[in-house]
Image (cartoon, rainbow, N blue to C red):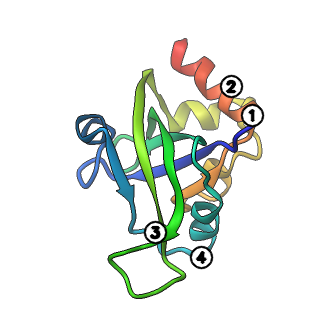
Amino acid sequence: MANRWLVKTEPSVYSFQRLQQERQTVWDGVSNPLALKHLGQMRRGDPVIVYHTGNEKAAVGIARVVRGAYPDPAQNNPKLVVVDLAAERPLERPVTLAEIKASPRFDGFELVRLPRLSVMPVSAAHWSALEALAKA
């Protein structure tokens, strides 16, 4: 089974809707060492939740890794990696951070535990819970 991930983006900088329009993008700009470690573990085929930060604070869509981690071609630093993501589909409805924090199903979820982390793994249980909330 593929690993599952969540990536955060400020929608005024790069939104899920823009990813849908462009169909695919290089996911770059990650500099936090732990987030870079997670980015480096992404493999082709892994599903990814796209989360909007800022005023929205909500999971909004599903993407897929179409090219696993490789050195950022725009940087001269082999520690800085990027992945290529392709849009799959928007969630049926956004799932807000407030909803996530209010549900005991998300105990231990890194989105709540490490709120500043921009790339994180998502357990199968947390993924299912997010999908269920998006359909509620």
Q: Report, in whole angstroms, how far the alpha carbon at label 4 lies from the one at label 1.
A: 24 Å
Query: Helix, strand, or loop for circle 3?
Result: loop
Position of residue 103 measured from the top left corner of the image (x, y, whole percent): 68, 29
**Tag 4: Cα neighbours inside 10 Å, few (<14), some, or many (≥20)?**
few
Residue 124, quarter of the rendered image: top right
Pick the residue in front: 32 or 21.
21
Number of marks in picture: 4
* Residue named by callout 4: 33
How far across and how far down the image is residue 78, in percent?
51, 83
Query: Which quadrant of the figure has residue 123?
Result: top right
Mark 2, secondary structure of its residue: helix
Q: Specify the quadrant that holds the N terminus.
A: top right
Earlier-in-chain disc, 2 versus 4: 4
Measuring from the top left, give residue 104's x and y in whole percent.
Answer: 75, 31
**Amino acid type, callout 4:** Pro
In the image, taking residue 110 as reference, residue 16 lies left or right, namely left
Relative to residue 25, is residue 2 depicted above or below?
above
Image position of 76 with respect to 7: above or below? below
Q: Which residue is mark 3?
A: 30
Q: Residues within 10 Å of mark 3 (few under 14, many from 20)?
A: some
Distance from the alpha carbon under mark 3 to that under mark 4: 9 Å
Q: Residue furthest bottom?
A: 76
Residue 56 to residue 92: above or below: below
Q: What residue appears at the point 60 percent right and 42 percent down from the top-left corner? A: 46
Question: Residue sitting at 30 percent across and 34 percent down?
Answer: 20
Q: Which residue is mark 2?
A: 128
For the residue marked with disc 2, what is the amino acid?
Ser
Question: What amino acid does circle 1 point to?
Answer: Ala
Q: Earlier in the sequence, mark 3 or mark 1?
A: 3
Left or right: residue 8 compared with residue 14: right
Left or right: residue 66 versus residue 13 is right
Residue 53 location (% of width, % of height):
40, 49
